[in-house]
C-alpha cells in the first residue's frame, strides 16, 4: 500500500522488514526440522508416486529463480518414468534444497539435473551439477555439519544458515540413501542423492 500511495521510503523499509522476517521464519523452520530429526521425531510417509511429476514440479518451482540469476537448467528425466516409493515431501525437500543451492552459488552458468534408475537394486539416484563457485576439497565433509558453510565469506556473500545440507543429508539417510559431493573451486559442484 505504501508504494501505491507514493511513500517510497516506507515501502523500501517494509520490504527490508519483510525480507528479514522471511529469513527468520526459514531459520526457525530449519532449526525445528533439524531438532525433530535429531530427536527421532520425524515420521516418514512412504507412498508410491510418479517420479516424473515430482521432477516437473521442481522444474516449475525453480525455473523463475534460475532465470533470475542468468543460469540455464538442463534436465534429463528420461529415466524418471514410472512410480517410485519414498516420502515424497522429504525427497522434494532434499532435491529443492540441492537445486536451490546450485542456483545460489552459480551465476550466469549451468545447472544440470539428471535422474537415473538402477533396475537391479530398485534405486533411483539424482545428480545435481553446477558450474558455480565450488567447494575446497578439505571442506567437503564439513558442509554437511549444521551451521557450516564453505567458509565465513560464503555466508556474507551468499547468505543462508548452513542448515540445508545438514538437514538434507540426515533426511537422505533416513530414507535409506545418502548424499555425496564432488567439487572443484571455481568450476562447480556435483551432488548425488
Image (cartoon, rainbow, N blue to C red):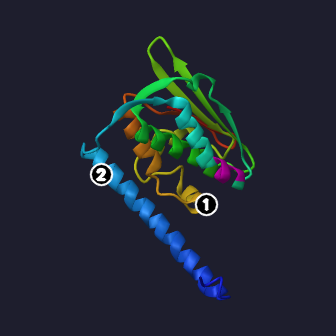
Q: Which of the two discs, 2 and 1, labels the residue nearer the N terminus?
A: 2
Q: Which residue, given by chain and number where applicable, does mark 2 sit on?
A: 35
Question: In the picture provided, is 117 more to the left or to the right than 24?
Answer: right
Which segment did they paint magenta? Answer: 63-67
Q: Indicate whether residue 65 is drawn in magenta.
A: yes
Residue under the point 43% across and 37% down: 88
The answer to which of 140 and 179 lies nearer the viewer is 179
For the point 58% across and 75% down, the residue is 15
Q: Secondary structure at mark 1?
A: helix
- Residue under the image location 25 percent in, 42 percent down: 40
How far, Cα to Cα, is label 2 from label 1? 27 Å
Q: Quadrant of the N terminus?
A: bottom right
Q: Is residue 139 or residue 190 the one in the foreground?
A: 190
Residue 41 is situated, as x and y percent measured from the top left of the image, at 25, 45
Does residue 184 lie above or below 125 as drawn? below
Q: Which element is circle 2 on? A: helix
Res. 157 mark? 1
Amino acid at each position: 500500500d505504501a508504494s501505491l500511495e507514493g511513500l517510497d521510503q516506507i515501502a523500501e523499509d517494509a520490504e527490508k522488514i519483510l525480507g528479514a522476517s522471511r529469513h527468520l521464519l526459514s531459520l526457525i523452520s530449519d532449526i525445528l526440522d533439524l531438532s525433530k530429526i535429531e530427536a527421532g521425531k520425524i515420521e516418514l510417509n512412504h507412498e508410491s508416486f510418479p517420479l516424473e511429476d515430482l521432477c516437473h514440479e521442481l522444474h516449475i518451482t525453480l525455473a523463475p529463480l534460475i532465470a533470475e540469476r542468468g543460469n540455464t537448467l538442463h534436465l534429463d528425466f528420461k529415466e524418471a518414468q514410472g512410480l517410485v516409493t519414498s516420502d515424497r515431501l522429504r525427497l522434494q525437500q532434499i532435491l529443492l534444497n540441492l537445486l536451490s543451492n546450485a542456483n545460489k552459488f552459480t551465476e550466469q552458468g549451468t545447472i544440470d539435473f539428471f535422474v537415473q534408475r538402477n533396475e537391479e537394486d530398485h534405486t533411483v539416484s539424482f545428480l545435481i551439477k553446477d558450474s558455480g563457485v565450488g567447494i575446497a576439497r578439505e571442506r567437503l565433509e564439513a558442509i554437511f555439519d549444521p551451521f557450516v558453510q564453505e567458509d565465513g565469506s560464503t555466508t556474507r556473500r551468499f547468505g543462508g544458515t548452513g542448515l540445508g545440507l545438514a538437514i538434507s543429508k540426515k533426511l537422505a539417510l533416513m530414507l535409506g540413501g545418502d548424499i555425496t559431493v564432488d567439487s572443484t573451486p571455481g568450476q562447480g559442484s556435483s551432488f548425488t542423492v
